[in-house]
Amino acid sequence: MNQLTTTVTQKGQVTIPVSFRKKYKMPSNSRVVVSEGDGFLKIRPVLSIKQLAGCLKRPGQKPMSIKELRDFRAKGVMFDQS
């Protein structure tokens, strides 16, 4: 796992390093989800509907079932309706 150190400002803001923003395609003003678990914080980008367009296309294969879609969502992909 790649780790970089950053600072929490007096206002509670954290700067996400450029290398991570590029890797996870997080332009300025991107939304993130912050969650906690087992003594750590996790920050994940919130994907917009536009970013998800076409991600489930599977040429030559049948459409995904509701269960398959729920399993996909359970893997931690967060959705933003904007």
Image (spheres, rainbow, N blue to C red):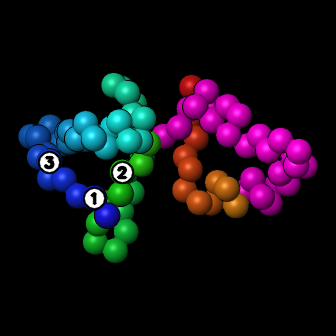
- Dot 1 lies on which element? loop
Image depth: mark 3 or mark 1 in front: 1
**Direction from residue 45 to residue 10 in the image, left or right:** left
Q: Is residue 64 magenta?
A: yes
Quarter placement of the N terminus? bottom left
Q: Label 1: how many residues lie within 10 Å, few (<14), some (14-19) or many (20+)?
A: few
Q: Which residue is mark 1?
A: 2
**Direction from residue 27 to residue 53 in the image, left or right:** right
Label 2 is placed on what type of residue? Answer: Ile
Residue 26 position in % (x across, y down): 39, 34
Q: Residue furthest front?
A: 60
Q: Identify the residue at horizontal 11%, vertical 40% (top origin).
A: 9
Calculate the distance from the C-alpha at mark 2 to the C-alpha at mark 3.
13 Å
Q: Mark number for residue 6? A: 3
- Dot 2 lies on which element? strand
Label 1 is placed on what type of residue? Answer: Asn
Quarter placement of the C terminus? top right
Q: Identify the residue at horizontal 79%, vertical 44% (top origin).
A: 58
Label 3 is placed on what type of residue? Answer: Thr
Residue 40 position in % (x across, y down): 29, 66
Q: Which residues are magenta?
A: 46-70
Q: Mark number for residue 13? A: none
Q: Earlier in the sequence, mark 1 or mark 2?
A: 1
Calculate the distance from the C-alpha at mark 3 to the C-alpha at mark 1.
13 Å
Q: Is residue 18 above or below residue 44?
A: above
| Residue 67 in which image quadrant | bottom right
Q: Which residue is mark 2?
A: 43
Q: Label 2: how many residues lie within 10 Å, few (<14), some (14-19) or many (20+)?
A: few
Is residue 50 at least partly visible in the picture?
yes
Residue 13 position in % (x across, y down): 20, 39
